């Protein structure tokens, strides 16, 4: 079955996605070599799952039998308001868990497509299976991989959540990749207080062992690494995104209700019961109360970083 690409994108817009692109399902060029290089340097820290099913991450045909197309979509989450205070959480955590929200939107997209193509079938993914969301979004023309190793959309910057539908249908027109617009800028690299971004063989890679976002979320140790400079972040980190010129000009798309901001602010002196209640159904539920207290008490703001505590 061949689908009309313009119709697919119209459906994505009706569902609420900010952008949609479509790439032909095949092996991503140089993906395996880049992933293996990243793993060989130990940049995956304790994320051992990144070593499993490595071949599938760059070739959806190994993940979905008969795959012919990858429909990539993104939703901007740049908030109109930010939570003020000396301690911060990453902006994506202001709202409900994006895995749940985007997965529901992808099912709605499939239902919309079926209205014209009843025999359409596809499998939705939102960062929950071995498929490289940002690399496929780049292949579908939604942006490029910036030096902060994130997808950067020319219109929405990198404050975006990504999902895709892998289908056994082809389309009448596939999208082309866009050129990298970093243009020599290395603000994200130089602004990281832990020097977590490295250029290896011409490609920028994230060393998770040095990354504040990894350590305040994925790291389950009793203590944070000695000397980790958090820039005031206690869940995730947005520093490499805050300095990006493309993010500075990207539109803010999300209205954060006063009630949500007040709930987040209450977390900083919450009991365990209050913490569990406030974080339920949000990205903050990825950590437990013990980690939360660890992050609050052990993070070291960088003394020479513009986002440090005074």
Image: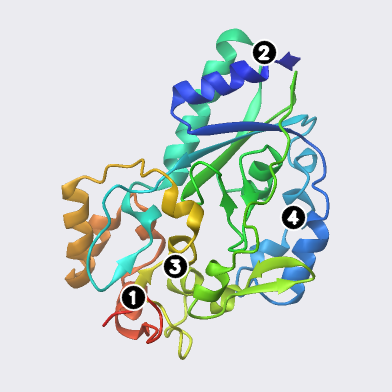
Q: Disc 3 to disc 2, how far (Cα)?
A: 45 Å
Local packing at callout 2 (Cα closer than 10 Å; few below 14, some 14-19, many 20+) is few
Please, what secondary structure does the residue beneath circle 4 have? loop
Q: Disc 3 to disc 1, how far (Cα)?
A: 10 Å
- The residue lying at 75 percent from left, 15 percent from top is 2
Task: Judge depth for marks 2 and 1 and give the one in front.
Answer: 1
Q: Disc 4 to disc 2, how far (Cα)?
A: 29 Å
- The disc, 3 or 1, on the residue closer to the chain's N-terminal end is 1
Residue 211 in sight here:
no
- The disc, 2 or 1, on the residue closer to the chain's N-terminal end is 2
Task: Judge depth for marks 3 and 1 and give the one in front.
Answer: 3
- Residue 174 in percent (x, y) is at 74, 28
- The disc, 4 or 3, on the residue closer to the chain's N-terminal end is 4
For the C terminus, give its image quadrant. Answer: bottom left
Q: Which residue is mark 1?
A: 232
- Residue 64 in percent (x, y) is at 74, 36
Pointers 4 and 3 in contact (C-beta within 8 Å) = no
Task: Judge depth for marks 4 and 1 and give the one in front.
Answer: 1
* Structure colour scheme: rainbow
Q: Which residue is mark 2?
A: 119
Q: Nearer the viewer, residue 70 or 186?
A: 186
Please, what secondary structure does the residue beneath circle 3 have? helix
**Height in image: 298 above or below 254?**
below
Mark linked to residue 53? 4
- The disc, 4 or 2, on the residue closer to the chain's N-terminal end is 4
Q: Nearer the viewer, residue 28 or 78?
A: 78
Please, what secondary structure does the residue beneath circle 1 have? loop
Mark linked to residue 239? 3
Please, what secondary structure does the residue beneath circle 2 have? loop
- The residue lying at 40 percent from left, 84 percent from top is 302
Q: Nearer the viewer, residue 74 or 178?
A: 178
């Amino acid at each position: 079955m061949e689908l009309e690409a313009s119709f697919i994108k119209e459906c994505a817009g009706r569902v609420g996605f900010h952008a949609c692109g479509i790439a032909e399902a095949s092996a991503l060029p140089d993906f395996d070599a880049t992933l293996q290089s990243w793993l060989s340097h130990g940049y995956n820290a304790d994320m051992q799952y990144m070593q499993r099913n490595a071949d599938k991450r760059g070739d959806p045909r190994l993940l979905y039998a008969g795959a012919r197309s990858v429909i990539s979509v993104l939703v901007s989450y740049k908030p109109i308001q930010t939570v003020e205070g000396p301690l911060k959480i990453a902006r994506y955590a202001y709202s409900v868990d994006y895995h749940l929200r985007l997965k529901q939107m992808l099912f709605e997209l499939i239902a919309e497509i079926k209205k014209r193509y009843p025999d359409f079938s596809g499998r939705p993914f939102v960062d929950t299976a071995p498929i490289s969301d940002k690399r496929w979004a780049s292949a579908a023309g939604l942006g490029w991989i910036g030096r902060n190793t994130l997808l950067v959309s020319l219109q929405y910057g990198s404050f975006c959540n990504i999902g895709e539908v892998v289908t056994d249908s082809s389309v009448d027109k596939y999208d082309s990749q866009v050129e990298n617009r970093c243009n020599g800028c290395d603000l994200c690299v130089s602004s990281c207080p832990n020097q977590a971004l490295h250029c290896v063989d011409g490609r920028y890679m994230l060393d998770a062992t040095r990354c504040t976002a990894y350590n305040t979320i994925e790291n389950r140790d009793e203590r944070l690494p000695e000397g980790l400079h958090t820039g005031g972040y206690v869940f995730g980190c947005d520093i490499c995104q805050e300095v990006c010129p493309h993010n500075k000009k990207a539109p803010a798309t999300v209205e954060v209700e006063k009630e949500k901001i007040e709930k987040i602010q209450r977390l900083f002196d919450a009991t365990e019961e209050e913490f569990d209640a406030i974080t339920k159904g949000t990205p903050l539920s990825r950590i437990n109360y013990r980690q939360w207290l660890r992050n609050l008490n052990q993070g070291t703001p960088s003394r020479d970083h513009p986002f440090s505590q005074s």
